[in-house]
Amino acid sequence: MNSADFHNKSFIFLLLLVSAGLIIILLPFYGAVFWGVILSILFTPLYRRLLVKTKQRRNLAAFGTLSVCFVIVIVPVILIASSLVHEGTTLFQKVKSGQINPALYTQQILNAAPAPVHKVLERTGFADVSNFQEKLSQIATQASQLLATRALSIGQNTFEFVVGFGVMLYLMFFLLRDGSALSMRVKQAIPLSAEHKRHLFNKFTTVIRATVKGNILVAITQGALGGLIFWILGIQAALLWATIMAFLSLLPAVGASLIWAPVAIYFLATGATWQGITLIAFGVFVIGLVDNILRPILVGKDTKLPDYVVLISTLGGMAVFGLNGFVIGPLIAALFLTMWDIFGSSRPTDRN
């Protein structure tokens, strides 16, 4: 091994070592860094418009963009979260005081179930009311303990949340202001041809914008529609269920139905026929169509990913990375397909 080769390999080793060390340091703020990058990419077009209007004053344009993001994204999230905590606490107190009795509702469904269902329930031990209530009580006790633990951890993690939130806004400001120069340096460091780098970066930004805007728009629409029909039908804590449906809507095809379908079954089983039929019709033909129509247009069309790839990568991403996975999963899938496309197109064609 000559001296130049040894120096090159040593430098690459040190580069990888330092990079790994930086990743370890940033792990506690992984969510803040991730969403700082995502939001800066989403709001870059607005930043460029403000940059023209402010006569190339980058700091002013970045601050204006950050202010708009704070008003239209962060403030609504905080308000919804506070309302959600209040409504969730009220619902929990009603369950605890007995005003809302899940065991009674379940017993009503069991009484209305046909004989074959009763036989299956008897085999599993759920047909015995006392046995079922005991199991339900155990679940409620465990849920109460979990809620109490979470409530204590909220106060303990407040400082960490505030720091992470500040890191996200601080990082977003500088990514907006210096993002073009930073992306150019990253492009120069990647050992690929200019055409391949352009293709990869375009795919990266396109997938992020389509996935975040598309999934969030679908989730907000389905959650709002679900909350509206719950409010019309007089179901308690409509905002809470709307928020849960919005989160579940991040799962393509099945999301919101995990909430409204059991409620519709309860209505039908307890004799509230028109409420059950109304909820099923609204869920299938309104909430369901939002997912079937908007998601392929907003997500699949721009990312050019098949629907089954979007579904599997979203589920897998959320299983591995949590809520952030609804962006990371499709992004990795899109980059995977793009890299293999580049690899296949760069290989010489076999003429034999």
Image: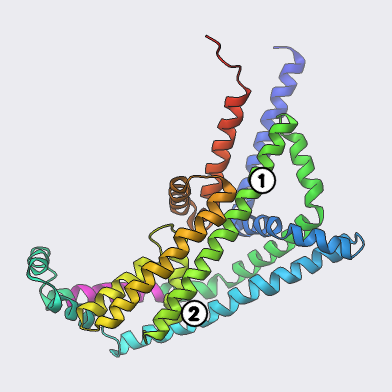
In the displayed structure image, the side of residue 50 where residue 108 appears, left or right: left
Identify the residue at image location x=29%, y=75%. 264
Position of residue 347 measured from the top left corner of the image (x, y, whole percent): 60, 20
In terms of depth relative to the viewer, which is nearer, 284 or 241?
A: 284
Asked if one can make out residue 52 in the rendered structure from this viewpoint, the answer is: yes
Position of residue 145 measured from the top left corner of the image (x, y, whole percent): 35, 74
Cα separation, mark 1 vs mark 2, equals: 37 Å
Bounds of the magenta segment: 133-148
**Identity, as a three-letter code, of the amino acid under mark 1:** Leu
Q: Please rate how many residues cluster around mark 2, counting C-alpha atoms within 10 Å: few if below 14, some from 14 to 19, many from 20.
A: many
Asked if one can make out residue 249 in the rendered structure from this viewpoint, the answer is: no
Identify the residue at image location x=64%, y=45%. 204
**Identity, as a three-letter code, of the amino acid under mark 2:** Leu
Q: Please rate how many residues cluster around mark 1, counting C-alpha atoms within 10 Å: few if below 14, some from 14 to 19, many from 20.
A: few
**Callout 2 secondary element:** helix
* Labelled pair 1, 2 in contact (Cβ < 8 Å): no
Reading the image, the residue beneath label 1 is 22
**Callout 1 secondary element:** helix
In terms of depth relative to the viewer, which is nearer, 195 or 280?
A: 280
Q: Earlier in the sequence, mark 1 or mark 2?
A: 1
Reading the image, the residue beneath label 2 is 84
In terms of depth relative to the viewer, which is nearer, 22 or 98?
A: 98
* Quadrant assignment for the N terminus: top right
Residue 144 in the magenta stretch? The answer is yes
Position of residue 67 measured from the top left corner of the image (x, y, whole percent): 75, 71
Q: Nearer the viewer, mark 1 or mark 2?
A: 2
Position of residue 136 measured from the top left corner of the image (x, y, whole percent): 23, 75
Asked if 197 appears above or below 343 in the picture, the reply is below
Asked if 112 appears above or below 294 in the picture, the reply is below
Asked if 41 appears above or below 75 in the picture, the reply is above
